Every structure is written in structure tokens, then in C-alpha cells.
Image (cartoon, grey):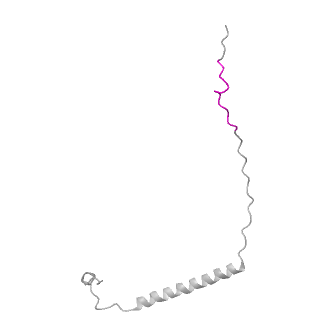
Amino acid sequence: MAQRKARKSASSKKKKATSRRAAPKRKVARRPAPKAAPAANKRVTELEAENRRLRDEVSRLRAELGDRPAAEESMPPDEIPPPEF
């Protein structure tokens, strides 16, 4: 006797989800970087000049601070009174 396979009822079968294949990713064409506008170039130049001036001023002030004589009557740190509020 041949064995019969048990059939499942149509309602008990799980429906197979229709799966779609992922679409291939598109390669984005690289665009050249937009050239900076003349106004932006001018601003960059101004900021660089200001930066140079500030660096010069800082170095000048540091040299001036180093040239000052140390205070002779300075108190040791442990003898300095606490600030009053």
C-alpha cells in the first residue's frame, strides 16, 4: 500500500510573503566642488590678516610681560589672605 501525504487545509497554509529583490544602488556622479565666490575669498583674506595681527599683538604683549621686573614685596602663597566677599 502506498502511503499518502497528509494534506493541509488551505486555511492553515501560511502565505509566502512576496519578496522583492532590492534595487541596485545607483552611483552618484561626483560633481566638482563649487568655486568659492569672490566675496568668500575676500572674507577669508580679511580673517587671515586679522589672525596675523592678533598673533603679533599676543607675542608683543608676552614679551612686554616678560620684561617687567618681578615685584620684590610679593607675599608667599601661604601668607596671602583669602578674598573677602
Q: Report x, y in % for residue 40.
A: 68, 78
Left/right of residue 81 with respect to residue 21 in the rendered view: left
The residue depicted at 67 percent of the width and 10 percent of the height is: 2
**Is 50 rendered above or below residue 25?**
below
Q: Is residue 10 magenta?
A: yes
**Residue interval drawn in magenta:** 6-18
Question: Looking at the picture, does residue 16 appear above or below residue 68?
Answer: above
Q: Residue at left 68%, top 25%?
A: 10
In magenta stretch: residue 4: no
- Extreme residue toward the left, this view: 79
In this rendered view, identify the residue nearer to me: 66 or 52: 52
The quarter of the picture where the N terminus appears is top right
Residue 73 horizontal/vertical position (percent): 28, 91
**Residue at the farthest front position:** 11
The image shows residue 11, relative to residue 52, as above or below, that is: above
Instruction: Estimate the x, y position of residue 48 in percent, counting from the top left.
Output: 60, 82
* Quadrant the C terminus occupies: bottom left
In which quarter of the view is residue 33 placed? bottom right
Q: Nearer the viewer, residue 3 or 66?
A: 3
Residue 19 lies, in percent from the top left, at 69, 39
Residue 22 appears left or right of 70 = right
Q: Residue at horizontal 65%, vertical 30%? A: 14
Figure label count: 0
The quarter of the displayed image where residue 81 is located? bottom left
Residue 38, picture quadrant: bottom right
Above or below — where is 78 with respect to 1? below
Magenta segment, prevailing SS (helix, strand or loop): loop
